[in-house]
Image: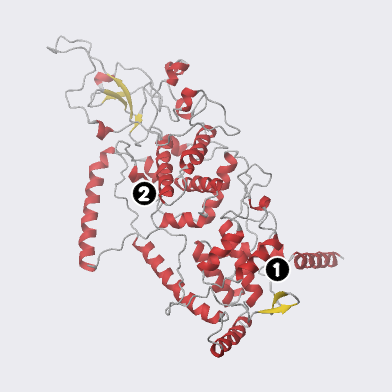
């Protein structure tokens, strides 16, 4: 590098506006203040001293770097597009229809790029820092610009709220400027530094967790047989790319520096977080009302309740009771279930959490779950089953509890061990700058060698391969002596005839929440385990682990179902509280 020979270059740096230039080994100008490298090269003016040469940009006498080492010019949004493509392909492998990737997800992504002013608009963000010369380019020249990497090949997005684009623009979702683009040594992407610092009001900034929100929005639009808890479980099991998804970027897309903070993830996604991000993105995109969730849809509570009853080994007869609760509370209505982002109070139903909450309410209606009635009913069922071995067995809550306790403890231990053994470090090492590349790769090789040696010394057994994806975490089979299947058991010992209908022998019920928090509070209610019976705690912990959610999150949903089911009880308590306040004032 030679500072003296670069003095004649007087243009200001596009990054820091300084006029202080040096020359790289390739003969390109770089800013000595911010280390920004331009595409401008020093030209040879006097060729007399160089025999048998033509006038051209000099190379400082050294070999030019290989294209692979230098990498492509790429933008951060292009990296997220690669991750979305990988996730869409993974969902397709899991059985989701190809329309999710080719139509729905692609159109949502294009709409996001337009709303965030990264593409499909007159003045995209990446174009604002370009020189005056480029700003004066003709429209036809803009159309002929080369596009960035595009793994989606889909028709243009024509939903409401989207500006119509010329055909030439619709085929190029991510245009790159032909003018000189400055590659910062602080990141592999062209806009990594700027993107990490960007804080524009009203813009939802893309992150890796938000890619899952995009996927779930697409699944919901298609009404696929995948709930949010299923999606997050597939992520944990490695069936859907999330952690270290950047490893699958093309080799030419160099990723280092600020890119590490954008694409590297070292924590698992949570249900609550992705749920909030999904609503946030849907509002930002101004998406129209989603397709109706009707009774024949997988996401309808009647179908999901049946699925989770089978999952936790409860009797099939309970499905009639869950359907009655769904009807009485109105949570099965189309308008209640269908997501409408442009509504005044935009919210979507937590379909899987709601279905599980309905089952918890039915269990409370049948067994009360007060650490007393459920055990006395179990004694009655046990005596009947002993005396009537050839008849259809009555459901024994105590025996079911013992079977499920053992199964859930084993499953929890497997889950905790898998999490503890998970390797967060990627096979493709990340480094802070191109200078650290060799050191990072060397360290990674040493770590891999040490891990191999350690695993050989500690455990010689081969590692178990990845599990096959399944909607069910538990499998119950009739005739299994080790684990009793309760699907065919009867509720006869818990129900009684009342006229032509059946009703529960238990006439009592206790509300999970006596008083709800005010509207400005972030949560509906609070959950303290010590305030509830051990049976209720077990049921809540069982379903919370099944969905990988917090127990308080499920308890809140149970309280909301009860509020709909027992409107009169809540209205009475509300009147009593208002009277007591009036009495105090008096």
Toward which corner of the image does residue 568 lie, by quadrant?
A: bottom right
Q: Is 324 left, or right, of 95 in this rendering?
A: right
Q: Is 493 left, or right, of 34 in this rendering?
A: right
Task: Specify the quadrant that holds the N terminus.
Answer: top left
Dot 1: within a 10 Å radius of its alpha carbon, few (fewer than 14), some, or many (20 or more) residues? few
Closer-to-camera residue (516/287): 287
Instruction: Residue 177: give its label.
Output: none
First in residue order: circle 1 vs circle 2: 2
Task: Specify the quadrant that holds the C terminus.
Answer: bottom right
Closer-to-camera residue (457/11): 457
Toward which corner of the image does residue 320 lie, by quadrant?
A: bottom right
Q: Disc count in the image?
A: 2
Instruction: Please provide percent x and percent y for residue 353.
Output: 57, 60
Q: Which residue is mark 2?
A: 244
Q: Is residue 422 above or below residue 482?
A: above
Element type at mark 2: loop
Instruction: Please provide percent x and percent y for residue 576.
Output: 80, 68
Closer-to-camera residue (139/308): 308
Dot 2: within a 10 Å radius of its alpha carbon, few (fewer than 14), some, or many (20 or more) residues? some
Element type at mark 1: loop
Instruction: Please provide percent x and percent y for residue 348.
Output: 61, 51
The residue sitting at the left extreme is 51
Q: Which residue is mark 1?
A: 514
């Amino acid at each position: 590098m030679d500072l003296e020979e670069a003095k004649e270059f007087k243009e200001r740096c596009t990054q820091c506006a300084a006029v202080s230039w040096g020359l790289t080994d390739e003969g390109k100008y770089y800013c000595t203040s911010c280390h920004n490298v331009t595409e401008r090269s020093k030209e040879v003016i006097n060729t007399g001293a160089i025999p048998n040469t033509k006038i051209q940009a000099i190379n400082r006498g050294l070999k030019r770097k290989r294209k692979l080492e230098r990498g492509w010019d790429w933008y951060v949004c292009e990296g997220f597009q690669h991750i979305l493509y990988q996730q869409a392909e993974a969902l397709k492998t899991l059985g989701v229809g190809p329309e999710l990737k080719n139509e729905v997800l692609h159109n949502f992504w294009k709409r996001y790029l337009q709303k965030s002013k990264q593409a499909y608009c007159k003045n995209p963000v990446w174009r604002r820092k370009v020189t005056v010369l480029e700003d004066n380019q003709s429209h036809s020249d803009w159309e002929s610009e080369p596009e960035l990497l595009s793994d989606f090949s889909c028709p243009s997005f024509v939903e409401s709220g989207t500006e119509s684009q010329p055909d030439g623009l619709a085929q190029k979702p991510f245009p790159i400027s032909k003018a000189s683009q400055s590659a910062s040594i602080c990141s592999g992407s062209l806009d990594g530094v700027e993107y990490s610092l960007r804080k524009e009001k009203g813009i939802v900034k893309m992150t890796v967790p938000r890619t899952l929100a995009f996927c779930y929005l697409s699944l919901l639009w298609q009404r696929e047989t995948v709930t949010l808890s299923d999606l997050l479980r597939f992520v944990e099991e490695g069936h859907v790319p999330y952690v270290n998804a950047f490893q699958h970027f093309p080799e030419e897309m160099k990723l280092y520096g600020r890119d590490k903070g954008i694409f590297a993830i070292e924590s698992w996604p949570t249900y609550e977080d992705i749920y909030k991000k999904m609503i946030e993105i849907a509002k930002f995109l101004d998406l129209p009302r989603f397709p109706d969730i009707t009774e024949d849809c997988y996401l309808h509570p009647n179908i999901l309740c049946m699925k989770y009853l089978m999952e936790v080994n409860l009797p099939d007869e309970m499905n009639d009771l869950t359907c009655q609760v769904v009807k009485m509370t109105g949570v099965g209505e189309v308008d209640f279930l269908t997501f409408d982002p442009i509504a005044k109070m935009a919210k979507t139903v937590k379909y899987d959490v709601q279905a599980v909450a309905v089952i918890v309410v039915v269990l409370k209606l049948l067994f009360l779950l007060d650490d007393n009635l459920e055990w006395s009913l179990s004694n009655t069922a046990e005596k009947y089953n002993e005396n009537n071995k050839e008849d259809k067995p009555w459901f024994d809550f105590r025996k079911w509890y013992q079977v499920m306790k053992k199964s859930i403890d084993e499953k929890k231990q497997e889950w905790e061990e898998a999490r503890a053994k998970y390797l967060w470090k990627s096979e493709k090492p990340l480094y802070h700058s191109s200078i650290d590349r060799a050191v990072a790769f060397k360290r990674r090789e040493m770590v891999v060698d040490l891990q191999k040696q350690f695993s050989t010394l500690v455990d010689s057994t081969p590692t178990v391969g990845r599990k096959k994806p399944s909607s069910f975490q538990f499998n119950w089979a009739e005739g299994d002596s080790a684990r009793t299947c309760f699907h065919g058991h009867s509720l006869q010992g818990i129900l009684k005839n009342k006229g032509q209908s059946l009703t529960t022998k238990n006439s009592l019920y206790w509300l999970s929440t006596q008083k709800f928090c005010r509207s400005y509070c972030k949560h509906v209610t609070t959950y303290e385990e010590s305030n509830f019976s051990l049976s209720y705690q077990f049921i809540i912990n069982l379903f919370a682990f099944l969905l990988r959610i917090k127990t308080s999150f499920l308890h809140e949903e149970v309280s909301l179902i009860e509020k709909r089911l027992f409107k009169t009880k809540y209205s009475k308590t509300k009147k009593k509280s208002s009277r007591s306040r009036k009495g105090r004032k008096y």
